[in-house]
Image (cartoon, helix red, strand yellow):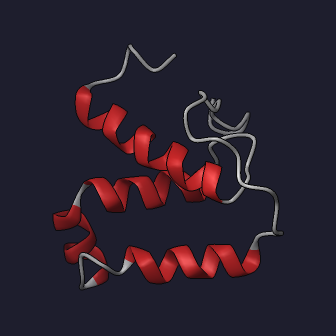
Amino acid sequence: MFERYTEPSRRVIFYSRYMASQLGSPEIETEHLLLGLLRADMVLARRFLGSPWAAEEIWREIERKKPARATTPGTGDLPLAQTLA
């Protein structure tokens, strides 16, 4: 599904898919891509957030604000949200 993307982009999507599945989301949404990008590029996270581990705080905030759903298996392909596609 994501074969047309570069290797760094696929890495971001891989992390994003994991984040989405942990929140039980049926698709990869904007916040999942943000977290995937910050996980894939620690230098970027440090430059913009002051710490390579700042994504953890953002993760907890998203978990707190999103409604709880059952965790989805991380092995399946999750599509990008319609707003992103």
Residue 82 relative to residue 62: left or right: right
Specify the quadrant of the image occupied by residue 50: bottom left
The residue shown at (35%, 32%) is 10
Position of residue 59 relative to residue 20, above or below, is below
**Count of numbered tags:** 0
The residue shown at (55%, 33%) is 75
Residue 67 relative to residue 43: left or right: right
Residue 15 relative to residue 68: left or right: left
Position of residue 39 relative to residue 84, above or below, is below
Q: Which corner quadrant holds the C terminus?
A: top right
Residue 75 relative to residue 52: left or right: right
Specify the quadrant of the image occupied by residue 32: bottom right
The residue shown at (50%, 77%) is 58
User: Percent from the top left, x then y, of residue 66?
Assistant: 76, 70
Specify the quadrant of the image occupied by residue 43: bottom left
Q: Which sits in the foreground, 10 or 74?
A: 74
Report the residue that reaches farthest toward the left: 43
User: Percent from the top left, x then y, of residue 35?
Assistant: 45, 61
User: Percent from the top left, x then y, of residue 59?
Assistant: 53, 73
Position of residue 16 relative to residue 68, above or below, is above
The residue shown at (69%, 40%) is 27
Position of residue 44 relative to residue 65, above or below, is above
